[in-house]
Image (cartoon, helix red, strand yellow):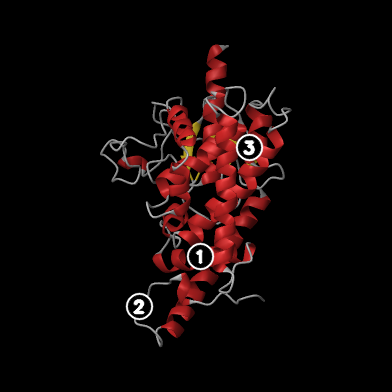
Amino acid sequence: MATEVNESTQRNTLVVRKPCFGLPTGCPQCLSAYLFLKFSEVPFNLDYHPNYPDSDQIPYFEIGDCVAYNNEKEGIIECLKRDVGDLDSGVSSLPDWIPTKVLLTTWLADALEYELWVGCSGSSAYKIYYSDLPWPIGKVLCWKKALWVKQKHGINKDNAEAKEEEIYGRANSAYDALSTLLGEQNYLFENRPSSLDAIFLAHALVVLQALPESSILRANFLERTILVRYVQQCNTKITEVSAFPSNYPDFNAEPSSSSSASKGRSTSGSKPKTKPKRKPQTKEEKTFKRRAKYFVVAQLVAVILFLSVRSGFSDSADLELDDVGYDFDE
């Protein structure tokens, strides 16, 4: 019976975006799913998806013959609670639960999104999502995403400073509220991990490790000693993630001879993982991949045309967001 359980758990695979900045994955959504599974103490393999960086299906979790995608109605965390166990049982009914969840999924999520794509000129976001793509395509996709973030928050040349102040102000208010909620506890609620701890710890780790030292959001976080202590103590429970030791191995370093064959693929356990046998592609998956190929071709054509026109105005081939205006409303 024990053998059957072990074989079953070996089929659990979390598919995420690539590791970077000393984290098992640099994507905040992927990292929160990873941390949820770690807090749940569910055995799983970790796999990396190098293609389709814009896909909202990533992260996704394969459990047996079933797959839970991030773009499902409930989101990846709710799918994990359904498939592997409800980590929030007994705490999700507490009075502070919903307000805290709103802070994490709105104000802090918006602040990190803004900082990744706009506040830090998109350098960190490019490394997380697009650095494996051909340079022109990756740069244009990163530029388009940054433009989308600005449009989402209603940011233009006239109100950029006011909007930035508003976003950071809300993040500071959220940090203050979370510091008060934490106090001397190790976790947000009843001194035990929950899905909100997974979401917040993912946010904190990306802020501390993926954002540059010049980041306003990072500086604001470091001013809250309670939050810094929280991250340090949570990291003692999750050995694969370590935000502070300077000698922590860099996931972006060249692979050693023992891992070069895997080319960046990793597992959450000590034993190497063989690639699980995939089930036949569904019609929807085939359609998605076909459309993705068309999208890449279209983007490549757009890049060539864009660079051809732009070469008449500048000798530089670097696509910077400030080189293009923001009034692109259709």
Residue 295 is at least partly visible in this image: no
Question: On the image, which quarter does residue 2 sit in?
Answer: top right
Residue at 43% x, 48% y: name it: 219
Question: On the image, which quarter does residue 176 sit in?
Answer: top right
Residue at 43% x, 79% y: name it: 307
The kind of secondary structure element at disc 2 is loop
Density class for disc 1 (Cα within 10 Å; few <14, some 14-19, many ≥20) is: many
- Tell me where residue 314 appears, x and y as whole percent: 38, 83
Camera-side residue: 54 or 277? 54
Q: Amino acid at mark 2?
A: Ser
The kind of secondary structure element at disc 1 is helix
Question: On the image, which quarter does residue 265 sit in?
Answer: top left
Residue 262 shown left or right of residue 86 in the figure: left
The kind of secondary structure element at disc 3 is helix
User: Badge 3 is on which residue?
Assistant: 77
Q: How far is mark 3 from mark 2, CA to CA?
A: 43 Å
| Furthest residue in direction left, as rendered | 257
Work out whether mark 1 precedes mark 2 in sequence or the reverse, and give the earlier one.
1
Work out whether mark 3 precedes mark 2 in sequence or the reverse, and give the earlier one.
3
Residue 265 shown left or right of residue 177 in the figure: left
Q: Amino acid at mark 1?
A: Leu
The quarter of the picture where the C terminus appears is bottom right
Work out whether mark 3 precedes mark 1 in sequence or the reverse, and give the earlier one.
3
Q: How far is mark 3 from mark 1, CA to CA?
A: 27 Å
User: Badge 1 is on which residue?
Assistant: 141
Residue 313 is at least partly visible in this image: yes
Q: Amino acid at mark 3?
A: Ile
The quarter of the picture where the N terminus appears is top right
Camera-side residue: 72 or 292? 72
Density class for disc 2 (Cα within 10 Å; few <14, some 14-19, many ≥20) is: few
Residue at 50% x, 59% y: name it: 117
User: Badge 2 is on which residue?
Assistant: 316
